[in-house]
Amino acid sequence: MRMYDIILKKRNGGELTKEEIDFVVNGYTKGEIPDYQMSALLMAIYFQKMNKRETADLTMAMVNSGEVVDLSAIEGIKVDKHSTGGVGDTTTLVLGPMVAAAGAPVAKMSGRGLGHTGGTLDKLESISGLSIEMPKEKFIENVNKVKLAVAGQTANLAPADKKLYALRDVTATVDNISLIASSIMSKKIAAGADAIVLDVKTGAGAFMKTLDDSFALAKEMVDIGTNVGRNTVAIVSDMDEPLGLAVGNALEVKEAIDTLKGHGPKDLYELCMTLGSYMLILANKADTVEKARKILEETITSGSALNKFKEFVVAQGGNPDVIDNPELLPTAKNVIEYKAKKSGYINKIVAIDVGIAALVLGAGRETKESEVDLAVGIVLNKKVGDYVNEGETLCYIHVNDMSKLADCERRLENAFEIVEEKVEQRPLIFGVVTKDGIQRF
């Protein structure tokens, strides 16, 4: 087989065989195929697309490029959840304890965040002593005992994806649905879960800006999961404004604790109820969304989800006192009120602008080497549709380095749009995609 022939075939709109895809992925991972040839093939795929079978074969070639985690020693149907990213996306910290308290094992492997805030791992490390590094045996033991464990991905999980993504990033070939879907699903499948619930974001703060593109990506990922024998469901949810109120690592942990206590932001709670319901259905703990939701609501009202979070924190070496006393989490030296410059209804809170405002404070990473300041970030005081008076607080800026404040405030100016007329709120959830098709709400 020659790489030249494979590039030519795809450039001319041909369909690649499984053997050709395996040859490409193995050769590139081992360094036998140079970047310039791989770049040419990626560009050919970008323009000529891949069909469902090619996309599934590409996914499995990336899965098999490294370690495939065997979770068969964990009792029950292991359910994983993945979000395509967003601003203030704290769902894992709420969902994990709720679903585990309902009896479904949650074995989650996460990566570090590269963007406006840290990832789930960075957020969890706001809790003193908590470790996300553990041997596989300990990970499995924790899930069997606590029903919940969150660990860092091993370096050898889908290494082909890491190498390919880095190349896509610098060759303008990131936004192709087959390449995005195979990248996400290769890591989820390699991580060993039996069933996967996907939270596909749509809107200004999401990777997919339009509803049609978001549903297309959701369908592609559900099809991949189905084709390789993983029960997969995708929810398409809004990311036009930040989810919840908090954007920042320790701030989001506090918000997750508030939500588990029953008084978190309504949108975060509702999204977790929806995602969690499908997780329970896939884990065979409920047969309808309504029944699953009742079970989850009971974990909040009874306090069992909050207790499960404590159990999880203790099992991973963290200080459980932070759950009763969130003031023990890292806190910023200064909290500055950012005030409205005029009265009216909030028409937009542009999620990406709020995210970047938090990033400049130090809440996220601009490069892999960036140090995250766990204490800083932004807490919204208003949401889209709310009325605000001139001089009223729109949000609170939690800042340590005051030299970064002006840049943060400048970015927040672009984030809030205030209008005279009352505005319609966008739906939180736009639809569900299963192996049986798309259901738009």
Image: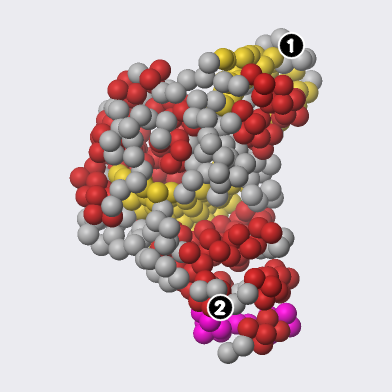
Q: Nearer the viewer, residue 360 or 320?
A: 360
Q: Which residue is mark 1?
A: 390
Task: Give me the residue at 64% from left, 49% from top.
Answer: 207
**The label number, if any, that marks residue 113 in the structure image:** none
User: What amino acid is found at the position of numbered circle 1 in the picture?
Assistant: Glu
Q: Look at discs 1 and 2 and give the one toward the viewer.
A: 2
Residue 32, numbered circle: 2
Residue 15, how many percent across, how many down? Answer: 63, 82
Q: What crowding class fits label 1: few (fewer than 14 Cα within 10 Å), some (14-19), or many (20 or more)?
A: few
Q: Is residue 347 visible?
A: no
- At which x and y percent is residue 431? 56, 49
Q: Secondary structure at mark 1?
A: loop
Helix, strand or loop status at disc 2: loop
Above or below, 425 against 337 in this view is below
**Left of 123 or right of it: where is 401?**
right
Residue 171 place in picture, x, y as percent: 71, 62
The reply to whether dot 1 and dot 2 touch (C-beta < 8 Å) is no
Residue located 66% across and 87% down the image: 5
Residue farthest toward the bottom in the current orientation of the protein:
1
Residue 42, image x and y in percent?
66, 70
Q: Is residue 311 left or right of residue 82?
A: left
Task: Report the number of discs.
Answer: 2
First to last magenta residue range: 9-25
Instruction: Check disc 2: other Cα within 10 Å, few if <14, some if 14-19, many if 20+.
Output: few
In 3D space, how far apart are the residues under numbered discs 1 and 2 (Cα atoms)? 62 Å
Residue 390 seen by the camera? yes
Dividing the picture into quadrants, the one containing residue 95 is top left
289 or 65, nearer to the observer: 65
Classify residue 177 as left or right of residue 389: left
Quarter residue 321 falls in: top left
Residue type indicated by callout 2: Glu
Q: Is residue 89 left or right of residue 189?
A: right
